[in-house]
Amino acid sequence: MYANNSLLSKLPSPQSAIWLLLDSRYFGGIESHVLQLASALTGQGFKVQVIFIADYGEHALKSRLAQANIPFTCLTRGWRSLLYLAIRERPLLLHTHGYKAGLLGRFTALLSRLPVVSSFHAGEKLTGKLAFYHFIDRKSSVLCQSLIAVSEPIKATLPAKARVLNNFVTVSEQRENTGKQLAFVGRLSHEKGPDSFIRLARFYRGFKFHIYGSGPMESQLKALATDNVIFHGAKESMAGIWPKIRLLIMPSRFEGLPMSALEAMSNSIPVLAYRVGSLDKLITNDNGYLIPPEHFTGLSNALFSYLSCDSLTRSQLCQQARNTVLEKFSTRAVLPQLLDIYHESIEAKYLCKLR
């Protein structure tokens, strides 16, 4: 165990589950994080329930949770059914992910007198209704016992009690990187910069560029792509794909601490990315390539440098990438910190009443 459970034994329902709340239509960074978190907590003996605040039908996360024997619930009546379930089942704690789940989770916790923790993952600039919703999301965060940001820029938009906590992944057994693909993994949307990936492919026509993901820019990107770009679509799991990849390219305009970068590096795959969000905490000159934001010439030059380097240099990049995740971004490194936050939140809500 990463942390003792003595605190939990003092609570009215020590066997209650930790609820992980999210609103999700597709599998992306938040969904990957929730899967990692649910698996890690379950592995440490905690009861976990993943709550989808709306049901959009078939979903890769549902399939992955079922495969891992992690229970989940899809709400059909939104906030009313969430409040009813919370009052009836009395979970140990609510942990929300994303603005819709954050808003519903906080008000549910307030009315049902449960502790709530909210994680803030998004770092992109928004407009219109989304900007308004995110504004309300941050203002209502004062209702939380604890706030978690995945990067310093995101923390700066939150109340002072927010803390930065690294995203994390379970690190698989070490393997040699024998992949051949130059790959983009993520949602095909403006903030992820897939258009820059397409542009890179034009300059390196002798190499295949592989795209894993789907999103609103997909048809536009296919129209722009040269014949050395291969679209694979969204994948339910990347486990069988990572061994095929030699370099992950992330030309994102906005990020927090992307799960795809962590997963790649844990699989000994170096990352070439723009310096946005908290990527500078993850990527250094020893384990990958970090370029000033939207500096396309720098991105292209770094790719040339990687393709030109000798096998020893590539091997060292791969090893350092994996070591970085093991030391700072693995379940072993981060989960104890999260459990401390859970304990503090539960104590703040309950123990003052019990003493």
Image (cartoon, grey):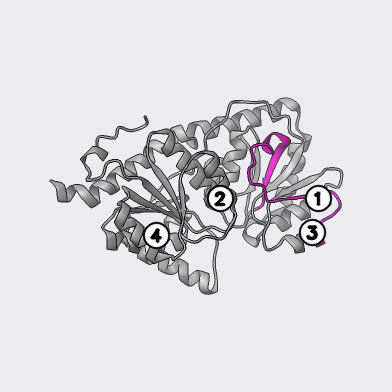
How far is the residue under mark 1 from the one under mark 3?
9 Å
Amino acid type at image mark 4: Leu
Residue placed most toward the observer, 262 or 353: 353
Residue holding disc 4:
158
User: Would you say residue 37 is visible in this rendering?
Assistant: yes
Label 4 crowd (10 A; few <14 / some 14-19 / many >=20): some
> Mark 3 or mark 2: which comes first in sequence?
2
Residue marked by disc 1: 229
Quadrant where the N terminus is found in the figure = top left
Mark 1 or mark 4, which is nearer to you?
1
How far apart marks 1 and 4 lie (CA) works out to 40 Å
Three-letter code for the amino acid on which mark 2 is drawn: Gly
- Region rendered in magenta: 222-251
Is 93 placed left or right of 213 in the picture? left
Q: CA distance from mark 3 to mark 2?
A: 23 Å
**Distance between the alpha carbons at the discs numbered 3 and 4:** 38 Å
* Image disc number at residue 29: 2
Report helix, strand or loop for mark 2: helix
Task: Indicate which disc, 1 or 3, sits on the residue closer to the N terminus.
Answer: 3
- The residue that mark 3 highlights is 222
Q: Residues within 10 Å of mark 3 (few under 14, many from 20)?
A: some
